[in-house]
Image: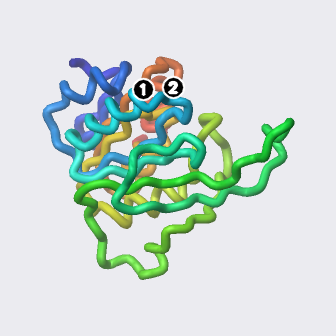
Amino acid sequence: MEPYWENKEHRLAIYHGNCVEVMPQLEHKFDLCLTDPPYDLSEEGKHGIHNKLLEVAEGSIVFSPPENQWLPADQYGFWVKPISTKNTSRRYSRFVEMIFFYGNLGWNTDRHWSQYTNVFTDLVDGETNHPYEKPTSLIRRLILNHTNAGDSIIDPFLGGGTILFEAHRIGRCGVGIETSEEYCHLAAERLDEEIE
């Protein structure tokens, strides 16, 4: 399968398509899968994707809402977001998201113990590239905690490309998969600008 975008020197690629169809075609086993799937997936959809995540990477980290949780995990984390009044019409607003940890996650023992608490309070800072973007500082911390320089990362729900962008910035390689061509293009542009 041909990538939508690729930089061979930095070992980065973006694939345009459905992750369930693309992941089995990738010949590489990744050190880490770090991803933020859509929060409205059915139980059947989550199970199908989850099994593929476990096959394609040694360890996986998945963001999830508390009200439609991903599958039971080995460990759990929580991202406490800034309290917002959006989406509160006739319902309580959610300002906590869960983080599910699976499999053989590497542990970077050079990191300070305070980086390993399971509650994160990072803020989305600066320009956002996707409506559901996660804080770059949180993504960077998770990558640093569970990988070493040169390790490979896959993000099956690339969105605006934050995970692949941060992976590259701290010396990791990786692959992103995205169904929206618009977001594939945006992520490719971000990476081209960073590499230049």
User: Comparing marks 2 and 1, which lies closer to the viewer?
Assistant: 1
Measured along the vertical axis of the image, is residue 195 above or below residue 6? Answer: below
Which image quadrant: the C terminus?
Answer: top left
Between residue 38 and residue 191, name the one nearer to us. 38
Q: Relative to residue 33, is residue 120 depicted above or below?
A: below
Q: Name the foreground residue: 189 vs 95.
A: 95
Q: Colour scheme used in the picture? A: rainbow
Distance in Å between CA atoms under marks 2 and 1: 7 Å
| Residue 165 visible (yes or no) | no
Q: Please give left or right for residue 189 compared with residue 170 in the image.
A: right
Classify residue 127 by image quadrant. top right
* Nearest to the observer: residue 138 or residue 39: 39
Q: Give neighbour class at mark 1: few <14, some 14-19, many 20+ (Cα, 10 Å).
A: many
The residue that label 1 is drawn on is 178
Task: Determine whether label 2 and label 1 are within 8 Å by CB.
Answer: yes
- Amino acid type of the residue tagged 2 in the rendering: Tyr
Residue at 80%, 40% (x, y): give it: 91
Q: 57 or 128: which is nearer to us?
A: 57
Label drawn at residue 52: none
Task: Tell me the quarter of the image containing the N terminus.
Answer: top left
Residue 180 position in % (x across, y down): 49, 20
Three-letter residue code for mark 1: Glu
How far across and how far down the image is residue 98, in percent? 53, 54
- Residue most toward the bottom? 113
> Measuring 42% from the left and 81% from the top, which residue is drawn there?
112
Q: Which residue lies most toward the left here?
A: 27
Residue position for label 2: 183
The mark nearer the N terminus, 2 or 1, is 1
Q: Is residue 9 above or below residue 5?
A: below
Residue 125 location, x and y as percent? 66, 53
SS at mark 1? strand
Q: Residue at x 29, y 61 (%)?
A: 147
